[in-house]
Amino acid sequence: MLVGEGPGREEDLTGRPFVGRAGRLLDELLASVGFCRSDLYTTNVIKHRATMAAAPGRDRAPAAAELAACAPWMTAQIDLIRPRIIVTLGRIPLAAFLPGARIADVHGRPQRCGDLTILPLYHPAYALHSPAARPVLFRDIRALARLGLRREPKGAGPGSGVGRS
């Protein structure tokens, strides 16, 4: 399961997560470890676009009240999907699962959150804006293989793990 922060402009327009430049980098990142987007369930911690009142159209970090309002949906998604691993993309989803953890301290290293395994990664958009983070992101995603997550053949049937991260 991949968990991002929330929809940006492109995602808001299409209703699909990670469709802009960050989404293309995410596709490249997943392909580097043998996955494609359809293998994994992708969602966000907030379900609406958070924009600045003073600068309409410019994204902002979600407020605590927004995160709290969307938390029941995230919990329901986790309960339904029952992921083996949750990959958090950026500091906001990391904080939703591991309050107080700093992405700079834990990126690429699996963490426990109750019964869940969390793999914190930098957000692909961060790697677009900070080119030095790109190789770090590609190194960190390899932790999926170390955790035993492998892509299974399409059509392997229920319980096969296809689509279950």
Image (tube, rainbow, N blue to C red):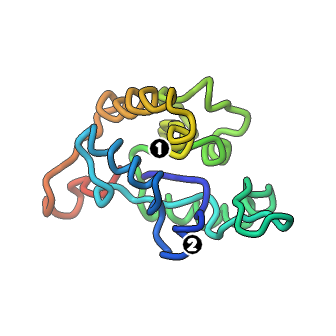
Identity of the residue drawn at 74% across and 60% down: 68
Residue 118 is at least partly visible in this image:
yes
Relative to 156, is 14 above or below?
below
Q: Upstream in the sequence, badge 2 or badge 1?
A: 2
Query: Which numbered marker is on residue 23?
Result: none
The kind of residue tagged 1 is Val
Query: Which numbered marker is on residue 12?
Result: 2
Q: Which residue lies furthest to the top in this view?
A: 105
Q: How crowded is mark 1: few (under 14 residues within 10 Å), some or many (20 or more)?
A: many
Q: Nearer the viewer, residue 80 or 13?
A: 13
Closer to viewer: mark 2 or mark 1: 2
> Pointer 1: what residue?
87
Q: How crowded is mark 2: few (under 14 residues within 10 Å), some or many (20 or more)?
A: some
Residue 132 location, x and y as percent?
51, 26
> What kind of element bears circle 2?
helix
Residue 98 location, x and y as percent?
65, 39
Identity of the residue drawn at 75% across and 63% down: 66
